[in-house]
Amino acid sequence: MKILKLEMKKIIMFPMLWIFFVLCLAFNVLILSDSFYESYGNYVSDIAKETGVTIDDHFYNALLQINDMNNPNYAYLLEEAGDITDVFDNYNIAYVGEAYIKAMKIEGSQPAQMLREKYSLMQERIDKKGDTNESLTLFFGGQTYNNYWYGLSRLINVLLLEGILLSSLMVLLALGYEDMNKTDLTVFSTKIGRKINSKKLLAGIIIGVGGFFILVLLTLIPYLLLNGYPHIWHSSISSGFNYISDSIAGARPFATWQSFTVLTYMLASIGVSVLLLICFMLMSYCIGLLIRNSYIGFLVLIILNGLIVLVQTCIPLTNVIHYVFYLTPVYLYLLNSYWFTDGVSIIWSYFELRGAVGSLLILSAFCLLAGRYFKSKNLT
Amino acid sequence: MLTVNHVTKNYGKFTALEDITLEFNKGVYGLLAPNGAGKTTLIKMLTTLLFPTKGDILYNGDDIIALDEDYRDIIGYLPQDFGYYKNYSPKQFLNYLGTLKGIEKSVLDKKTEALLSLVSLSDVANKKMRKFSGGMIQRVGIAQAMLNDPEILILDEPTAGLDPKERVRFRNLISSLSQNRIVILSTHIVSDIETIANKVIMFKDHQLLCNDMPKNICKYLEGKVFETSEISKIEKPHLVLTQRQEDDKTYTRFTSEEKPAGHIKEVVPNLEDVFLYIYKDEE
Amino acid sequence: MRIILNEMKKIWNIKIILLIIFSSLVVYNMFMSFNINYFFSNHPEQECYVFAMEMTKKYGKRIEQKEFDQFIKEKKLLLNQEFIQSIANESILTDNGIYTFDDMYLFFNAEGNRHIQLEKLNGDEEKLQLMSDSKCRIYGKEYDYIGFKFQTIMHIENDYLNAEKYIDYDISSQDTGPKSITRLQEIKDTKQYKNISINETRIINRIQPYFFFGSIVIMLGVIILISPLITTDNLRNMSLLQYTSKKGRKLLSHQLIACLISTFILVTLKVLIFGGIFSTLGTQVFWNNAFNAFYNHSYSTFDFTYGQWILMQVGLLYLLAFVLTFIVFVISKMSKNYITLILKGIPIFTVFVFICMRIFDKPFFMKNPLYRFTQIVGIELIVTLLLIALGIVGYVALYKKNGVMDIH
C-alpha cells in the first residue's frame, strides 16, 4: 500500500500534468462558451419545474395554467407539446437495418443476418417503450437535438479524448519515471523488483480515473447548470424530441437498449468512459513495458490505434471480422455518440459494453504477457 | 596561466563558493574536498557552464567569458555525469564532438584513431556504446576531452566507477598528459592525486583552505599521527582516522596533539589523514 | 556545415522516420484518400466539373456570351438525345406524360408539393412512388447520371444569365464588408464572372479537405521529427560536453538551422508525394484559369489563377511548418523529459489544427473566416508571417537566455 501511495505521489507531483490538466479545462471552457446555449431550451427547463417532464394530462393542465402567452417560447412549446406523439407506437425499426444492409451491399452475408437479428431484438425493446410511452417526455422540446448532439454529446466526446490522453500519459510517465531519473537499476534490484510495474499501473489507473472524474465534474457541472439540465434530468433520453440522423437511414428515434433518463444515460456513459480509459491505460502499459522510450511509446500508441482503423477499412464488409474492430477501444471512442443505442451498422447489441469488457480482458492478458517479457528482460 | 580572481558563486541565499583566488600554471592540480564542497561548481565556472556571482576568471589576463570560443578551444572537459549517445560508436561520438570542437575532418579522423588507441579502445571503435562497460565509457570520455589537444584539461571525478587496474592506468595516463598543460583533477579519492598532483587545492566551508604541494599539506599533521592495535586503551583525546587488519589484529590510525601512553607508534601523515582530519566535522 | 549535418543525422533517425511514415499512412488513409478515391463521385458536382473542363478545353480561360450560347445549345442537344434514350426504358414516366427533362423537372421540382403531384395522379401513391424511383434511376449511375447532367446545364445557364444579379445580391447583403463590396464591384466591372474555373463545390468538398488534412499530416510530421532533438540531449546531459566545446552555446543556432532544413526536406517530400497523388486527378487543366466563374458564388480577394492558388497554399504550408519548427524547438529545449515534451506538444498541435482550419478554409477567398473577420486581403499570409515573427522572437529569447544561464 505504501509503495502504491509513493507511485501515486510520483504521478501527482509531476507539474506538467497539472498544466496540461488546466489547459484541458481552458479548452473545455472554450467549448462551453461555444456550446449550444439557447434561450428556448432554458425556458423549457424552467417550465419543467412546474409541469414535470412527462407529457401527460397533468403536464398539459400545468402548462395551460402557466398561460405565458406574451412569451413566444410559451406559444411554441404549447404547439410542440400538442403535436408530439409517441414515436415508438407501432414503430418498426427493421427498416434501419435494411437501409444499412443495402447501403453497405452486404445482402446475403452473415453480418447482414446478424444485423437483422439485432434489429429484431431491438424491436422488442421498441415495443416495450411504446407500451410505456417512454418517448412522451419533454427533454428540451424542439431544442433537444441541438442541445444534446452539439452540447452534451460533444462535450462528453472531448472529455473522453482528454481523459484518454491524460491517463495514457500517466501510465507512460509512471513506467518511464525510473528511466528518467536513472533510478531504474536501483529500483528493480529492490525486494519488490520488477513487480513494481504493477503498482505503477494501478497508481496510473487510480490517478487517471480520478483525474478524469475531476475533469468531468469541473466541466459538466457548469455546462449542465448553465443549460438548464437539472430540471429535465428525469426526461427519457429517448424522448420524442431526440433523434439520430444519418444519410443512410435518415432521422429516427433515439432508441436505447435500456430505458435511460438523461441523468442515468450520462452516468452510464461516464461509466463506460472509465472502462475505456482503463483499456487505453492497459494499452499504454503494454507498450511502455516493451518500449522503454516514452516518446516513441506514445507515438506507437497513437499509430497503433490509427492502424486498427486503417486495417478495418481493408476488411470486406461481408466479413464478420470487419465488425469485430468496432469493439476495439479506438472505435468505442469514435462511436461514443451511439453508446447504448441500436449502434447503426454494428452487428451486436450493447456493443459498447461488449467492447469495453472484451477489450479489458484481452488487454489484461496482453499486460500479463508484457509483464512476463519484462520480468525476463536484461536491464542495462 | 589561468587565474581565478576572488570568485564567489551564490545561488540565492546559498553560497556555494566564497572569495576563491587561485592560479594555475602547467602541472597537475588536485581539487580535493568532500561531496558538496564546491569542486564541481568551480570546475563548471572554469568551463564557462556557470557564471561567477562575483569576481572573474582570467586566461593569460583575459576574461574567459569574453574570450568565448577562443578559450573553449583550448580546454578539454570530462564531466562528472558523463552523457553520451547510446546508439553511437566511440568513433562516431568522437567525430561528433570533434566537429563541435572545430577540428578539421582530415585531422579529426587521425586524431580519433590515435586517441582511441591511447585509451585502448581501438578494437571497439565501431561498436555501439550501449554495450560498453563503465570503464570503457569513461575512457571514451577521456579521449573526447583530449580531442583538441587542450592546454587546460579539466576532469571531474574521472575515476568514479573504475576498477583498481583502470584507476592505475588512468593515473599513468594523466601523468603522461600533464607535460606542458594545466590538468585540473577534481576528486574525493585521495589516492587518485596523492602521487600525481603537483599541488592540492582543498576547500572548507565553501572557502579556499589550502593550495600547496602534498608533502607540505601533510606537514600539517607532522608528529600528530599515530598507530596502535589497542585503540580502546587510549585515554587522551584523539580522532580515529583509518583502520587496517594485519596478523589478526586491527591497527588503528589516529591523531592526537600529544603522543598517548601505551603501545603507540608514530607514523608519517599522508594526505588521507589530513583529509579526514580537516573534514572531521562535515558528516 | 558539418555541425548542422551532424545534428541532422540525429534528427533523421530510423525509428522516427518509420513513425512519420506510419502516421502519414494512417492519416492519409483515414482522411485524405477518400477525397482522391471519390473525387469524381459527388453529383451534380461532378457534372459541373466535367462541363467546366469541356469549356476550358474548347474556349480557354473565358467564355463570352456567343460562345456560351453555342456551348449550351450543343450540350442540350446531346443531352436531350441521351435523355430520350434513357427515359424510353422508364415507361412509368412516359405513360404519365414525362418525355423530356423539362417535363420531369416541372413535375418533381417546379411543383414540388406532394399534394399537387398526387392530385395529378388521382391520389395514386403507389404510382407516385414508382415514378419517384424511376426519377432516381434517371439521376443515377444506370443512365450515366443524365438527370444530374441536365440539371447542371440548366443551373449553369441560369448562373451565366444572372451572374451580375448574383454579384449585386452579394454587394447589397448586410454581411458584405466595404472592402468586399469594392472587390465585388471590380469583379463585376471587369466581367470576371465570364471566367471558366474549377467549380467551387469540388474545391469545398474535395480539394480543400485534402489540403487541410495534408497540412495536418505535415504538422504532425514536423512535431514528431523535430521535438525529440533537444530533449534527448537534455536527457543525456549532453549540454555539458556541447557547451564546453569550441562551438559552445552557439550550437543552439546550428541545431535550429538543422531543424529548419529538416522541416524543409520533410515538407518537400510530403508535398511531392501528396501533390503527386493529387496531380493524377488532372485538375491541372485549370492551372492557368482565374477564379470567379459564373457558376461559383464565392469570390477571390484578388486576382490569381488556380495554379497560383495551389502554389500559394503550398507556400503557406512551408511557412506554417517553419513556424511550428520554431515553436517545437523552443519547447524541446525547455523539456527535460519526453512526457513533458508530449504534454506540451499536444496543445501546440491542437492549436495548429485550429490555425490550419482557419487558414486552409478557402484561403484568399472572401469566404475565408479570417478574411470575413478582418476584411484584409492576404490575411492568411499576414497571420502566418506574424506567427513566424512570434516563433523567431521565441527563439531569440531562448538563445539569449541560453547564453547566460547556468548549466548544471
Image (spheres, rainbow, N blue to C red):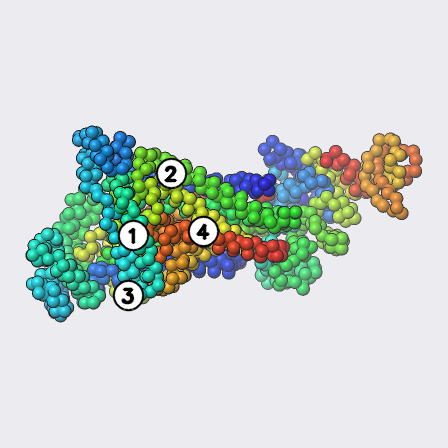
**Chain at tag 3:** C
**Chain at tag 4:** A
Q: Earlier in the sequence, mark 1 or mark 2?
A: 1
Identify which amino acid the numbered label 2 is placed on: Leu
- Name the mark nearer the viewer: 3 or 4: 4
Identify which amino acid the numbered label 3 is placed on: Gly
Q: Nearer the viewer, residue A128 or A64?
A: A128
Number of the label disc, if any, that sits on residue C282 = 3
Q: CA distance from mark 4 to mark 1?
A: 25 Å
**Chain at tag 2:** A
Q: Nearer the viewer, residue C228 or A364?
A: A364
The residue that label 2 is drawn on is A220
- Name the mark nearer the viewer: 1 or 2: 1
- Residue at disc 3, secondary structure: loop
Residue C314 relative to residue A57: left or right: right
- Name the mark nearer the viewer: 3 or 2: 2
The residue that label 4 is drawn on is A357
Residue C253 higher or lower than A223, as above or below: below
Number of the label disc, if any, that sits on residue A123 = 1
